[in-house]
């Protein structure tokens, strides 16, 4: 069933669990995300990044994703990830997305607040919830995300940001990276604890890929309710395709088979994240 993102995340916050938000781009990735969540009997958020819009027809994609979500046995939300343009946010709201992320993290705090507040007012008129970011998540390996400067979130700024913008969920920069880590991950769990006590809303972890399971579990104890996953799923699909296309059978295989195999390859990776986020760990 299609459920507002806010309902899913407030329930997760109560349970001290988190929900996976998988970046999706096409039918196969949407189907895999929903199948993974159904297999684990957990909710899921399917997220489409603004950067994919030149290649993905938003209206067509939303119609397909919403139809699949409505048939699903578990709660599914539809989220616009990392939007920098008001135009894409308006379009996504018109197409039935249940939440949007406005990313004003590259601006100074005052300007980020002003821009985010405008988006929140607009989205709330349509009952659509908003995620925003302060601090900035860096880019590691294999990511197609915009480069951030790695500034960690200041808890006092977070408090002011949430109060003044009325945002529903906050992406906190605590040292995770978009993509895979190129060295040892340096995640500041104490900072996350301080952010959690400064704001009441669900917190979002960007850069789930490659983050050690034990650290993800500890972030869930400190207010993380949504974990974004993109690169690890993409890497699994790409490695599979590289292996397959170098085999002799590849040239005799129909594209439909290749796409179905790709879906089968990413399914266990997605299931692993859904399972991990459903776990309750005491630390
Ligand atoms: Zn992100």
Image: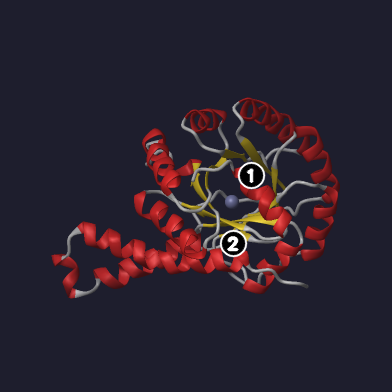
Depth check: give the residue in front, 233 or 98. 98
> Can residue 173 be seen from the camera position used here?
no
> Can residue 208 be seen from the camera position used here?
yes
Label 1 CB-ligand 1 distance < 8 A = no
Residue at position x 54%, y 61% in the image: 179
Residue at position x 37%, y 49% in the image: 26
Front tag of 2 and 1: 1
Residue identified by numbered label 2: 208
Tell me the element at label 1.
helix
Query: Label 2 crowding class (10 Å Cα cut-off): few <14, some 14-19, many 20+?
Result: many
Q: For the view shown, which residue lies furthest in the left direction?
A: 252
**Residue 168, image quadrant:** top right
Q: Position of residue 97 (x, y in %)?
A: 51, 37
The reply, left or right, for residue 22 in relation to residue 27 is right
Are circles 2 and 1 on residues that touch, CB within 8 Å? no
Depth check: give the residue in front, 246 or 34. 34
Q: Which mark is residue 7?
A: 1
Query: Label 1 crowding class (10 Å Cα cut-off): few <14, some 14-19, many 20+?
Result: few
Q: Position of residue 283 (x, y in %)?
A: 78, 73
Q: Position of residue 269 (x, y in %)?
A: 47, 67
**Residue 89, image quadrant:** top right
Above or below, comparing residue 252 to residue 224 in the picture: below
Q: For the view shown, which residue lies furthest in the front direction?
A: 73
Tell me the element at label 2.
loop
């Amino acid at each position: 069933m299609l459920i507002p993102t806010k309902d899913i995340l407030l329930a997760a916050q109560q349970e001290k669990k988190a929900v996976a938000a998988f970046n999706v781009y096409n039918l196969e990735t949407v189907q895999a995300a929903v199948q993974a969540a159904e297999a684990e009997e957990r909710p899921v958020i399917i997220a489409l990044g603004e950067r994919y819009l030149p290649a993905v027809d938003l209206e067509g994609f939303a119609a397909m994703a919403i139809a699949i979500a409505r048939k699903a046995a578990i709660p599914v939300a539809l989220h616009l990830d990392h939007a920098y343009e008001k135009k894409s946010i308006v379009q996504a709201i018109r197409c039935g997305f249940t939440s949007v992320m406005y990313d004003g993290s590259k601006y100074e705090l005052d300007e980020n607040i002003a821009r985010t507040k405008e988006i929140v007012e607009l989205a709330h008129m349509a009952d659509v919830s908003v995620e925003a970011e302060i601090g900035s998540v860096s880019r590691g390996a294999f990511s197609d995300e915009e480069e951030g400067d790695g500034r960690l979130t200041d808890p006092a700024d977070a408090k002011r940001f949430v109060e003044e913008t009325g945002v529903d969920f906050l992406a906190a920069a605590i040292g995770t990276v978009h993509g895979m880590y190129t060295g040892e991950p340096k995640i500041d769990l104490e900072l996350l604890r301080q952010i959690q006590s400064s704001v009441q809303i669900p917190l979002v972890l960007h850069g789930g890929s490659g983050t050690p399971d034990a650290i993800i579990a500890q972030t869930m104890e400190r207010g993380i309710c949504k974990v974004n996953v993109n690169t690890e799923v993409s890497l699994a699909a790409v490695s599979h395709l590289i292996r397959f296309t170098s085999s002799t059978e590849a040239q005799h295989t129909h594209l439909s088979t290749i796409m179905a195999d790709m879906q089968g390859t990413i399914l266990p990776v997605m299931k692993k994240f859904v399972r991990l986020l459903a776990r309750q760990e005491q630390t």
